[in-house]
Image (cartoon, rainbow, N blue to C red):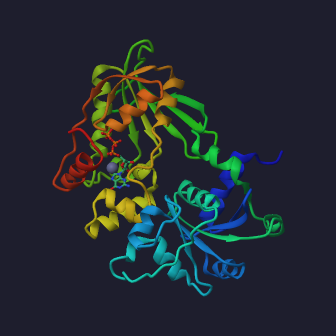
Amino acid sequence: MGPDLNETLARARGDLRMGVPVVLSGAIGTVLVAAAETLPAARLTEVLALGSCDLALTDRRAETLKARAYDGDLARVIVPNDASMAWVHGLADPSEDLSQPLKGPLATRRGGDANLHRLGIALCKAARLLPAALVVPVNAGFAGENGLVEIVAEAAAPLMAALPALDHVVSARVPLRAAENARLHIFRPADGSDEHYAIEIGRPDRAKPVLARLHSACFTGDLLGSLKCDCGPQLNAALAQMGQEGEGVLLYLQQEGRGIGLANKMRAYALQDQGFDTVEANHRLGFEDDERDFRLGAQILGKLGFGAVRLMTNNPAKIAMMDASGIKVTERVPLKVGHSAHNARYLAVKAEKSGHLF
Ligand SMILES: Nc1nc2c(ncn2[C@@H]2O[C@H](COP(=O)(O)OP(=O)(O)OP(=O)(O)O)[C@@H](O)[C@H]2O)c(=O)[nH]1
Ligand SMILES: [Zn+2]
């Protein structure tokens, strides 16, 4: 009856988003982890009273802060006993970096094991929060005594890195402006994360390469008609071409902001208003250029019965991943629409830094 590890991880993500800490236990000990973004000030006081606290940040964020990342991919910043919430937010959130540049010098921990810190950051990312985790050692019974979720780190880390299984939930006919003979399929990940959608136009022959598009959700571009990116026009053009050809499949993947979530994407936009490009903005927030897992798309295509695609994309990483995941890309169909004065720089950065083909 009790929750399995997948379910416990989903609870942990929910708790972190609510500002409730979780406990991670591993061979090296037990720690309390809290998301820097959401922890209420009163809980910070309690956390600091427990002992020597670290703020785990990614190497990307540490670089901006000039903090030494002795663990390679992350830095363990030593949090002063009297640190305020403003101090923690100033390190986790880059929005005030330019107006309040003097954050240091920051002391970072060296030696010892950083695996629980690494898992803490991964949980914050999975919860679509800023990748910054407060980490403090606690005794083994702490979770039970305080009613907190506890996760065994050694089992959780590989599960979080793996692709969740997807269940097909339901399919129904949805006539579209671009194609009247469309069906919407809903897929639900077993890890409790957001559902992904497939829009099937016509009844494509499973034995032949299908015209396909892997579209990452973009609330601003797809729904609001934002001119900052080319997503909305790409979505419409892909459906229109599938409508014209009479068949195709468009995957609508819940990977808003290249996998960082809408709130973080808006943080990136605010940094772009300060003069940083898309890639620099992601790095200053502590993210990689692209946090999406494209294997998802391959799994959904496989579940729908497709083994080969004519892929509508300008992104070579998508083609490489499809081939690596067992879906053959027989042709790249360019998707060059929606260019405007507002997104000229954005598209230039995609070509220069992300290898997009235009
Ligand atoms: N983090 C971040 N995400 C963005 C930004 N602009 C758009 N996105 C997201 O980027 C994703 C779309 O990525 P694109 O690079 O346009 O498309 P692609 O999938 O890489 O490549 P194509 O198949 O050629 O379109 C969507 O999830 C958008 O929400 C930005 O400035 N920062
Ligand atoms: Zn977009």
Q: Up-down: is 195 above or below 141? A: above
Horizontally, residue 34 falls left or right of residue 318, namely right
Q: Is residue 111 above or below residue 170?
A: below
Q: Quadrant of the N terminus?
A: top right
Q: Residue at x 33, y 67 (%)?
A: 271
Between 175 and 247, the residue placed more toward the observer is: 247
The quarter of the picture where the C terminus appears is top left
Q: Is residue 230 left or right of residue 109?
A: left
Quarter holding residue 35: bottom right
Q: Give the camera-side residue of 36 and 214.
A: 36
Query: Between residues 299 and 154, which one lies in front from this camera angle?
Result: 154
Count of marks, rendered view: 0
Residue 77 x, y percent position in the rendering? 54, 73
Outermost residue on the left side: it is 341
Q: Position of residue 277 (x, y in %)?
A: 28, 60
The residue furthest front is: 111
- At a point 51% along the width and 82% down the height, the residue shown is 86
The reply to whether residue 178 is in sight is no
Would you say residue 248 is visible in this rendering?
yes
Image spot of residue 202 (x, y percent): 40, 20
Is 205 above or below relative to 61? above
